[in-house]
Each structure stands twice: as structure tokens, then as C-alpha cells.
Amino acid sequence: MADYQEIIASYRGTPGGIIEAYHAVQREYNYIPAEAVKEAAGVFGLSEAQAYGVATFYSYLSVEPRGRYIIRMCESAPCHIAGAEEVIQAFEHALGIKVGETTADGKFTLELTECVGQCQGTPVITINSQPYAGVSAEQVPAILAQCK
């Protein structure tokens, strides 16, 4: 695992560097640790509050530890009408968690998201940003089995 200090330093002087650095840290750790926010504040000449504000402003970024597999259910109107609620209930039942939670083993996090631009195949989920279109509640066990 790459060191967050090295990752952040590599974006020093880059326009929009703090956001790019946060994305890179999150790719490595699956979230942005508090120490990385403090490091970014120093590298980019911001207060810790400002650096934290950037880290928490964008829904894609997270300062909370998350699972290895981040399952996001689209909650847009087309997905909702197509049965998103049944799909999310199936994931909650199969994983034993509610939306916004992570399994005890740290393997899965279940989240809601806005439109992912796959409206031709509603309802849509993403797992680590990979879209799965036309998902039904019956498919949930097979989808989870693919996550190893």
C-alpha cells in the first residue's frame, strides 16, 4: 500500500491538486484517513477545516472507513420506479447491514447515489464504480458471489 504522504506530495503544485490527491488516496485506502486530510492541509496551504471541507463536500469521497467492495444503489427516479427499493432490501438482507453501513468483516459497504448515467438499464448499481444494469433482487446473491 502506498503511503498517503507520498501520494499527496505528488499532487503539490497541480491545479485542483487536493481533489486529485484525495481521489488517489481513496483509490489506495478506499477512504481518506484523518491523517491524510491533515497532510493535505499542510501540502496545499489550507487550514485543516478547509481541507476537511473539500474531503466531505463531494459524495464520491469518504472520510469514513469503507468496505473493500462499495455497492452503490442509484436512487434516481427511473431506478426507483424500476424496483431499486426491492434491490436495496435484498442487499441489506443478504449482507445483514443497512444503507450507510459496512459489514463487520470490512468486505462490503452499502450506499445510495444519484444517477450514474445508465438509465437505459434501470435499476442500476455500481460496485467499486463498475456499473451493473437491470439488477433484480433475485440477482443479488449471484452478484455478491462474484466479489471475492
Image (cartoon, rainbow, N blue to C red):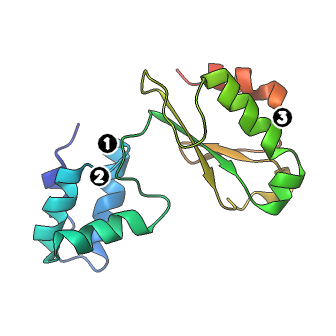
Residue lying at 29% horizontally and 52% vertically, measured from the top left = 25
Q: Which residue is the site of mark 2? A: 25
| Mark nearer the N terminus (3 vs 1) | 1
The circle on residue 60 is none
Residue of label 3: 136
In the figure, residue 140 lies in which quadrant? Answer: top right
Does residue 103 appear to the left or right of 73 in the view shown? left
Dot 2, how many residues are within 10 Å of its Cα: few (below 14), some (14-19), or many (20+)? many
Q: Tell me the amino acid under the disc marked 1.
A: Tyr
Of residue 93 and residue 62, the one placed in the foreground of this image is: 93
Q: Nearer the viewer, residue 54 or 16?
A: 54
The mark found on residue 29 in the picture is 1
In this orientation, which residue lies closer to the viewer: 43 or 103?
103
26 versus 110 height, above or below:
below
The residues bearing labels 2 and 1 have C-alpha atoms spaced at a distance of 6 Å
Secondary structure of residue under mark 2: helix
128 vs 54, left or right, is right
Residue 13 x/y as whole percent: 18, 77
Q: Find the distance from the CA under tag 2 to the CA under tag 3.
A: 33 Å
Three-letter residue code for mark 2: Val
Q: How many marks?
A: 3
- The residue sitting at 83% across, 42% down in the picture is 134
Distance between mark 3 and mark 1 Cα atoms: 30 Å
Report the side of 47 relative to 66 (left or right).
left
**CB-based contact (under 8 Å), mark 2 and mark 3:** no
In the image, residue 77 sits, relative to residue 148, either above or below, namely below
The three-letter amino acid code for the residue at tag 3 is Ser
| Contact between labelled residues 1 and 2, with CB atoms less than 8 Å apart | yes
What residue sits 48% from the left and 58% below the top?
60
Quadrant in which the N terminus appears: top left
